[in-house]
Image (cartoon, rainbow, N blue to C red):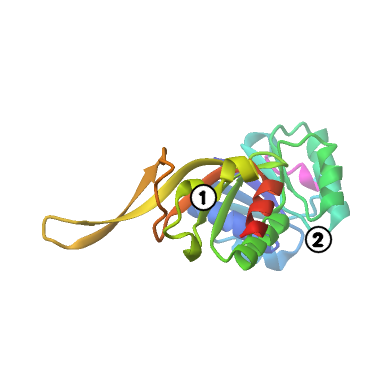
Amino acid sequence: MKYIIIGLGNYGHVLAEELSALGHEVIGVDMIESRVESIKDKIATAFVIDATDEQALSVLPLNNVDIVIVAIGENFGASIRVVALLKQKKVEHIYARAIDGVHKAVLEAFSLEKILTPEEDAARTLVQLLDFGTKVESFKVDDNYYVVKFVIPEKFVGYFVNELNLDEEFHLKLIGLKRVNTIKNCLGISLTEHSIVNALPEDAKFRPGDELVCYGKYSDFQNFWKAL
């Protein structure tokens, strides 16, 4: 796929570098020359231009890429103006980064394809690690609902599945469980493999390393973590 990333600060730089490493064609844009210099050899093309200038923005192949990502975060005014210019130029697929609730609310008025909230997501991940004490991965379905995968805390080991009362008490749906199994190959060497268990009997016990995959409201996940 082809991407244009406008804004090559820390977030935009990593985004451009990672997408390029996966084989995508990335065009990077920033008004600060040092940022462009630091990444120009890692992506397809890089431009030193002020994207808030309508004429300067016109040099980019805006309608010949799959997605234009506005990664500007620190300069609220610049972010909004660039998005407005992109909409004016009828760019179909626009993603934009929002750094806070106000920024997000303004971007929502443009009916963008996706609003990115990396700071919010990173903060939530850290809170989950600090408070829950285990690694948590989440997929945001919408503003309220998430799919969350987490390694069970050690104190869960040996508990029966039905003892968690996920559905009745916390309104969380257990989708599945990722389990670590130790097997031996034909040479008798112990190997580790992962299997997915989609249907857990209520009398099943949790084992060390089990990962639960659940679906529900983020507020219900918060209540679950508090109860632990």
Q: Nearer the viewer, residue 200 or 53?
A: 200
Residue 10 on the magenta span: no
Instruction: Indicate the position of residue 49 as horizontal and vertical percent values.
Output: 76, 55
At a point 60% along the width and 52% down the height, the residue shown is 45
Residue 59 on the magenta span: yes
Q: Residues within 10 Å of mark 2 (few under 14, many from 20)?
A: few
Q: Nearer the viewer, residue 197 or 91?
A: 197
Picture disc at residue 67: none
Q: Nearer the viewer, residue 172 or 82?
A: 172
- Which residues are drawn in magenta? 56-61
At a point 86% along the width and 54% down the height, the residue shown is 76
Figure quadrant of residue 202: top left
| SS state under label 1 | helix
Q: Residues within 10 Å of mark 1 (few under 14, many from 20)?
A: few
Q: Is 46 displayed left or right of 190 in the figure?
A: right
Instruction: Indicate the position of residue 200 as horizontal and vertical percent values.
Output: 41, 41
Instruction: Specify the principal SS of the magenta part.
Output: loop
